[in-house]
Amino acid sequence: MNPPDRHSSKHLEKSKCITTAKGISAENLQSIKAHLTAIIMQLFERCVHKTELSHVSEFIGQDQFTYKKGHNSTMALIECHHTWLKWLDNDASYVRIFSFDFSKAFDNVPHDILCTKLKRLAINPYIINWTINFLKNRQQRVVVDGIITNYLDINCGVLQGTVLGPILFSIMVNDIKAIDHQNELIKFVDDMTLGVPGTNEGDTSRIEVDNIIEWSQRNRMLLNMDKTWEMVMCGNVHRSIPNPIPMIERKTWLKIQGTILQENPSNWDMHFDQLINKANSRMQIMRVCKYYGMTIEQLDLLFNSLIMSVLTYGIELWGCAYYDKYLKQIDKFVSRARKYGYTSKGYSMKEIIGSRDKKLWDKVTSNVNNPLH
């Protein structure tokens, strides 16, 4: 077999997105950012990852909860919430919580800075050079309704939809750290949550925020300040709290990884309203499917995947909510669905919480490297 020529190798550096975009004219197709590499390239990525880069997670800090085996968004939420409540139980008068969001994070990763960070890791230099070459000279185009754009050069960003993209992004943001070890910075993909305990003497929020802003400027990954917010958690006791940082809007609630947290940690009103409303909106699908004759077995499967997945997401965190006020709402919702024939199963929130808590406990205690251990 002859070795591939230059044209075939260049072909592997091109990506194509075939989409059915809504409300986008052909003139604006060039603005769509998407990356789909050739199948053979994806297979080769998997080989490289399995044989040469599987140990990279060892270099990624414990504050990153995504793209790592045994980590997920629920664990990130539990770690945050537990730490905040622990501070309040001790000597903290309040906890300042900041939710940061990068502007088009994956698309704006500078290749030169990422390559510099790659070279600092204990990775086979040949693999580093291959990865750098993997990022360089890439092109992409978009195909919509038979309209094909011209190829455009990509000089920044890590490829979404690829095997190496998540690993490279984790390496890029790995050196964002809290200055004060008493504070906590948790990362999940491109979302960062910073917790800072405060006392009557004040807190170090401004220093931490300035540090993150400086990092984003130094690494040419700008923060989206319109989606960066602060919440102050005080518990049931009213405390005097400091003034907000001028550039960051203060709110009475934050939505972190799909879960709404309020300034009073025992208040789950907004989160349960969100759960019930979202489940109600999906019930229309159940009604249509039942009308067109789906069997009860099929409806059970659909109800579990569409409805129960919403009603139980993150339950390890908010399952401690007061039953009569909050959890009972879900039991009533499921009971009505069963009464009208959308499911044959009798789900009990108390049983689900007990089962999920035990599963999480076993997972945490069986692995000393688990972030919640």
Image (cartoon, rainbow, N blue to C red):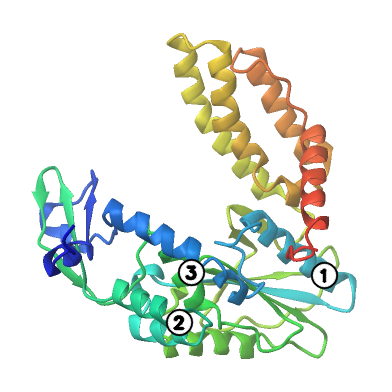
Give the number of the disc on residue 52: 3
Q: Nearer the viewer, mark 3 or mark 2?
A: 3
Residue neighbourhood size for the residue with mark 1, other residues' Cα within 10 Å, grouped as few (<14), some (14–19), many (≥20): few
**Residue at 63% in and 91% down:** 207
Q: Nearer the viewer, mark 2 or mark 1?
A: 2
Res 163 visible: no
**Residue at 16% in and 68% down:** 152
For marks 3 and 2 on the same chain, the one whose residue lies earlier in the sequence: 3
Disc 1 target residue: 238
Given the current orientation, which residue lies at the most extreme right position? 90
**Residue at 47% in and 78% down:** 172
The amino acid beneath tag 1 is His
Q: Where the C terminus falls, by quadrant?
A: bottom right
Disc 2 target residue: 118
For marks 1 and 3 on the same chain, the one whose residue lies earlier in the sequence: 3
Q: Is residue 120 above or below residue 240?
A: below
Q: Is residue 18 above or below residue 151?
A: above
- What is the distance, in whole Å, between disc 3 and disc 2 at their CAs? 13 Å
- What is the distance, in whole Å, between disc 1 and disc 3 at their CAs? 54 Å
Res 112 visible: yes
The amino acid beneath tag 2 is Leu
Residue 345: percent from the left, percent from the top? 69, 19
For marks 2 and 1 on the same chain, the one whose residue lies earlier in the sequence: 2
Quick check: 150 left or right of 82?
left
Label 1: state its secondary structure.
loop
Q: Is residue 329 above or below residue 90?
A: above
Residue neighbourhood size for the residue with mark 2, other residues' Cα within 10 Å, grouped as few (<14), some (14–19), many (≥20): some
Question: Which is more toward the observer, 348 or 301?
Answer: 301
**In the rendered structure, are the residues bearing label 2 and label 1 in contact, judged by CB atoms less than 8 Å apart?**
no
The amino acid beneath tag 3 is Glu
